[in-house]
Image (cartoon, helix red, strand yellow):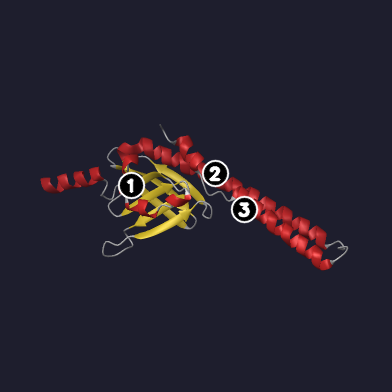
Amino acid sequence: MAGGFLGRVAADTLGISDIGKIIDVKDFDKVDGDDFILHEDGEKIYYVIKSKTDEYVFTNYGLIHVDGKSAVDKKRLVKRYEFKSTILSQVYIETAGMIDLDIEIKFNLGEETFSIDVDRNQMTKLKQIYKTLVEISRMQQHHKMLFQDGVTGLERANAGISRNLIQGDIVEAVEKLTNFNLDWMEALRKEYQVRDYSNVYEKYRLV
C-alpha cells in the first residue's frame, strides 16, 4: 500500500502521471517534442506540459502534441497545429476544488478539442498559458474578419470592372487584373495570416 502511494507521488513529481507538469525552461531540451521543433526556421518553445503519455509543446508557431495515448508499443504520434492555418478558440481554465489534485486548461485548435490536466500547484504558470492562448485566439478572430473584409472588397471591385467595357487589348487587361488579384490576396495573407506569435508569449510570460 505504502509503496503504491509513494510511487504515485514520485510519478506526479516527475510529471509522468496522468496529471501534467509544466516543465521548467532549463529542461526543454530533454522533452521528446524538442526533436520536432523547427529551430532552423526560428521556432521556439515557450511552454511544455508533460504527462505520462503526452507532451503538449507550445511554440511561437503553434502546438506540437506528442501523443502517446493513440500510439502502440510505446510509439509516439507527433501532431502539429500551426497558428497560421489553424484557428484557436474556446479557451477555458478550470480551477481546482477542495480535494482536486489538478487544474485544467481546455481549448480548440481547428476541429481538435484539447483538455489538459495540470498539477494544481502550477496555477501561476498555467494562467500565463491561458492568457497567451486567449490573446492569440482574439487576434486570430480579428485577423480573420479583416481578411474576409479584404476578400469582399476585392470581389466587389472585380464585379464592378466586369460590368464596364474594358478598353484596349482584352488579353492584356485580363492579365493585369489577374496579377492585381494575386498581389492583393498575397498581401492579405501576409498581413492577416500570422505565423509568429512570440510577442504574445513574451507579453504574458513572467520574468
Q: Are marks 3 and 1 in contact (CB under 8 Å)?
A: no
Question: In front: 179, or 203?
Answer: 179
Q: In the picture provided, is 90 more to the left or to the right than 3?
A: right
Q: Secondary structure at mark 3?
A: helix
**Image x and y of residue 38, in percent:** 43, 52
Q: Residues within 10 Å of mark 1 (few under 14, many from 20)?
A: few
What residue is disc 3 on?
A: 189
Q: What residue lies at 77% left-to-right and 59% top-to-bottom?
A: 158
Q: Secondary structure at mark 1?
A: helix
Which residue position is annotated with label 1?
29
Residue 60 on image: x %, y %? 47, 46
> Left or right: 20 with respect to 175?
left
- Whether label 2 touches label 3, CB < 8 Å: no
- How far apart are the alpha carbons under marks 1 and 2? 30 Å
Judged by depth in the image, the label closer to the viewer, 2 or 3, is: 3
**As rendered, which of 70 and 181 lies closer to the eye?**
181
Q: Earlier in the sequence, mark 2 or mark 3?
A: 2
Image x and y of residue 198, in percent: 49, 42
Q: Amino acid at mark 1?
A: Asp
Q: Quadrant of the C terminus?
A: top left
Q: Sequence-wise, which precedes: disc 3 or disc 1? A: 1
The circle on residue 175 is none
Q: How many marks?
A: 3
Q: Which label sits on residue 138?
A: 2
Q: CA distance from mark 2 to mark 3?
A: 18 Å
Rendered location of residue 44, percent (x, y): 43, 46
Q: Is residue 186 above or below residue 122?
A: below
Q: Residue at x 36, y 46 (%)?
A: 48
Classify 10 Å Cα crowding around label 3: few (below 14), some (14-19), many (20 and above).
some
In the picture shown, does residue 171 fall above or below 18?
below
Relative to 147, 11 lies left or right: left
